[in-house]
Image: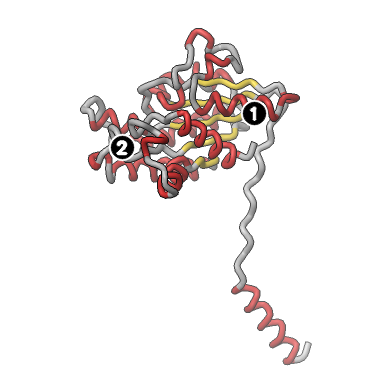
Amino acid sequence: MNRRDLLSLTAAGSAASLLPCPALAAPAVKLEKGATILFQGDSITDAGRDRKTEGNANHPAMLGRGYPFHLAGQLLTDHAALGLSIYNRGISGNKVPDLEARWQQDCLALKPGILSILIGVNDIWHKLNGNYDGTPEVYRDGFTALLERTKTALPAVTLVVCEPFVLRCGAVNDSWFPEFETRRSFAEEVAKAAGAIWVPFQAKFDEAVKAGTEPAYWAADGVHPTQAGHGLMAKVWREAVGI
């Protein structure tokens, strides 16, 4: 190789190194035949579900009135040949320690192939009300431990961590901030460390409000979604998870 060729190759290599690298596409979630999908969380997930029917997969009353109900209808329609079993085990008022206390029965025993968790708003709301003293670090560390326990028991599970969210109306005022943002950022940190899919609820609600709708249109009290809010959550969840 002569000097001219060597210089040409070096220049080409240097130019290539300056080009932006294409983003790697996230691996698609593969739905197995007979897969179980479980939604876990607090009242936002609970959404008035019927405890008497909680053992019956896909039962409308068991799914509640919220985003799990929206999602179950869509997923069962779009993947009718797979025989999916969809459950909702959200419980109103729950915080991370409450999930930990009931995790064996309400999660691990169901052996979900896809596990979706939305938790965090009560961890701050109950603190503001004087009924809980957990710090953001307690939330982060407890959530981390919960996901580690889950992956140990269910190594093939696809974890989906949903972004905690609030809208500035109703019960949500300046006293929630900046601590809520700290907790929200911890949720994202925990999700990334666990290799979970992140569902950006707060980001999408913020976009919707910025586009011109009032916060109360999506969650009248700032926490619990309206019908429109749950519908938006279902849309964002499917976009993030890819099924």
Q: What's the residue type where badge 2 is placed?
A: Cys
**The N terminus is located in which quarter?**
bottom right
| Residue situated furthest top in the rendering | 52
Label 1 crowd bin: few (<14), some (14–19), many (20+), radius 10 Å: some
Q: Residue, x 75% and y 25% (percent of image)?
A: 81
Percent position of residue 206, x then y: 41, 46
User: Between residues 194 and 182, which one lies in front from this camera angle?
Assistant: 182
Percent position of residue 3, x then y: 73, 92
Q: Nearer the viewer, mark 1 or mark 2?
A: 2
Percent position of residue 4, x then y: 73, 91
Q: Residue, x 28% and y 28% (percent of image)?
A: 126
Percent position of residue 148, x then y: 49, 34
The answer to whether residue 190 is above or below residue 105 is: below
114 relative to 95 in the view: left or right: right
The answer to whether residue 173 is above or below residue 85 is: below
Q: Residue, x 55% and y 41% (percent of image)?
A: 197
Q: Which mark is residue 175?
A: none
**Circle 1: element type:** helix
**Circle 2: element type:** loop
Residue denoted by label 1: 75
Q: What's the residue type where badge 1 is placed?
A: Leu
| Residue situated furthest bottom in the rendering | 3
Label 2 crowd bin: few (<14), some (14–19), many (20+), radius 10 Å: some
131 relative to 32 in the view: left or right: left
Residue 24's quadrant in the figure?
bottom right
**The C terminus is located in which quarter?**
top right
Residue denoted by label 2: 169
Residue 27's quadrant in the figure?
top right
User: Sequence order check: which comes first, mark 1 or mark 2?
Assistant: 1
